[in-house]
Amino acid sequence: MSLGEFDLIARYFTRPARRAALGVGDDCALLSLTPGMQLATSCDMLVEGRHFLPTVAPQHLAHKALAVNLSDLAACGAQPLAFTLALALPRADEVWLAAFSHGLFALADAHDCELVGGDTTQGPLNICIGVFGEVAPGQALLRSGAQADDDIYVSGALGDARLALEAFRGTVALAGDAVARVRVAMEQPQPRVALGVALRGVASSAIDLSDGLLGDLGQVMRRSGVGAAIDADAVPRSADLAGQPLAVQRECTLAGGDDYELLFTAPPSAADTVRTAAAKAQVAVTRIGRIQAAPGLHLQDANGQTLPQVYGSFDHFRT
Amino acid sequence: MSLGEFDLIARYFTRPARRAALGVGDDCALLSLTPGMQLATSCDMLVEGRHFLPTVAPQHLAHKALAVNLSDLAACGAQPLAFTLALALPRADEVWLAAFSHGLFALADAHDCELVGGDTTQGPLNICIGVFGEVAPGQALLRSGAQADDDIYVSGALGDARLALEAFRGTVALAGDAVARVRVAMEQPQPRVALGVALRGVASSAIDLSDGLLGDLGQVMRRSGVGAAIDADAVPRSADLAGQPLAVQRECTLAGGDDYELLFTAPPSAADTVRTAAAKAQVAVTRIGRIQAAPGLHLQDANGQTLPQVYGSFDHFRT
């Protein structure tokens, strides 16, 4: 079976434009923002072996490729509008494409985010999505806004994606039903879009957790010019991860990567507002530490004992 | 030498935000459009062996990757604002990156188009650029606006990029200085941004020539619901190409691909306005045929003799 580029686009990636002024099929897509709003945009490129395992189902791969981009919008508190998809494929496999398209549109529709354009080509498997959202000027959540004494929160539970990776690598033992659960965390993260929107005007800074908690927190510290104290035992984790040795728990929660939860800061006076925002977004949030004026990271356990900081950040060029 | 992802971004791809509200370094970039304007966006993914030869210099590769995207904005008549760059590299090679970055910013600066974000990862070489421009509602040039009796124009000269490719493949003989000239056409196309902007309100339809004249014209015909008559001998070509056998000239001009010139249509009454727009943009434009109400393509030579239509469109999955 040989599908040409135009057939491919028409069959699997073209739907009528909804909100977009012009969707798939011309040289550019055209979008109108709500008057007065700023465009928020981000792009992420996913490569086999770096960002996903060759065993991943195409519908989950599509989900993840879009989810990691929506997660960037969430971290800015932007409302998703649209996205573009550039796809390099070794061959045009209709079964693969049908599943990929299904997974892609399922997540896109859940966030009312419209596919407006893209590119397809033959080549080593590579998925590059660009995402567009909108946010009022001055309302975007930035990495640079954390202040001394702000509380540090994370959404959801951390470390399951890394636990799944380690289970696939064979470095941890995990029962079959647990593997199935943590695999969902690895392959089908839920971008915290509603939480990001609810935190506008509440959080002082935010970032999405893609490279591991401590590495991503380091970005906030660096850009905000602050330090932080983290209670490693307070970092939320699933029951599956809590059943692992403490060293595995710490590695997975503190430096796991691929969490796609939000880390954010807010002043202690906003604690109730944070709880209200989390409830509105129907996402659990947990306080895990505090921003400090003095630079550097202070990592401790629940007893206040200082822990050695041996956890690296995931680096797509170094790991 | 081992450069991490953050070092890479900081060293080669971070410059202070200019017009953007927020540039490289946060989860999203933030852009404000001119009030009342629509966002025009496009993305193109370039893969080694499909879109460029392994011998291309990194600064030329960067130029081309951005140029093909700016060419999409040009085809819509949009004014460039900003772009994102996602880059998969086999390894972080500083010499390569310095040259790539140089070529990228040289073209970006020439069009006042700002790098606002992106992604870098280890993987088979892949370059995906997303580009953002703005255009007033209703002013964008579309593929769908061609009307019966409209004149058909192209900018510049066609076929040199394909001639260069054939010279590299060894299927045509070309003197060394001619190789150098046509290689510039292949590796460093000049996006016709000023012409696209000047044609707003003048051209009835437009498309950029990336897959070959007849294939791209076919897109305009299909989306406009019209046919076309083309004088193959009127299609502008360089002196280097004009020195080749007629069959090579026709293959290169009609189905060459990678031209990144504009094809556009305008009513005969707008002929003077078209000339004025071209002069303003300092780009040659040539009338090569006419839109017809009857569907289908009628290809003829300068004597009005019908030519067999044997020219295919470049397809990134079929070639």
Image: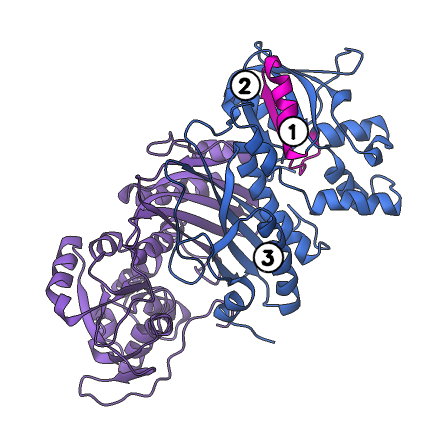
Chain colours: A purple, B blue
Residue A1 shows in this picture: no
Left or right: where does residue A88 sit relative to residue A131? right
Q: Which residue is mark 2?
A: B146
Mark nearer the viewer, 2 or 1:
1
Q: Secondary structure at mark 2?
A: loop
Q: Secondary structure at mark 3?
A: loop
Question: What residue type is disc 3 on?
Answer: Leu
What is the C-alpha distance between the residues marked 2 and 3? 38 Å
Give the magenta part as a residue range.
B255-282
For image coordinates 39% across by 39% down, the residue present is: A115
Q: Nearer the viewer, residue A250 or A275?
A: A275
Tell me the crowding category of disc 2: few under 14, some 14 to 19, or many 20 or more residues within 10 angstroms, Cα based: many
Image quadrant in which the N terminus of chain B is located:
bottom right
Whether labels 2 and 3 belong to a single chain: the reply is yes
Tell me, yes or no, whether the two marked residues, 2 and 3, touch with CB atoms within 8 Å.
Answer: no
Question: What residue type is disc 2 on?
Answer: Ala
Left or right: where does residue A205 sit relative to residue A15? left
Magenta segment: does it hold B279? yes
Q: Chain of mark 1?
A: B
Estimate the x, y position of residue B165 in percent, counting from the top left: 75, 43
* First along the sequence among labels 2 and 1: 2
Q: Secondary structure at mark 1?
A: helix
Query: Which mark is drawn over residue B247?
Result: none
Q: Which residue is mark 1?
A: B278
Tell me the crowding category of disc 3: few under 14, some 14 to 19, or many 20 or more residues within 10 angstroms, Cα based: some
For image coordinates 80% across by 44% down, the residue present is: B181
Q: Which residue is mark 3?
A: B125
* First along the sequence among labels 2 and 3: 3
Tell me the crowding category of disc 1: few under 14, some 14 to 19, or many 20 or more residues within 10 angstroms, Cα based: many
Tell me, yes or no, whether the two marked residues, 2 and 1, touch with CB atoms within 8 Å.
Answer: no
Question: What residue type is disc 1 on?
Answer: Ala
Q: Nearer the viewer, residue B62 or A34?
A: A34
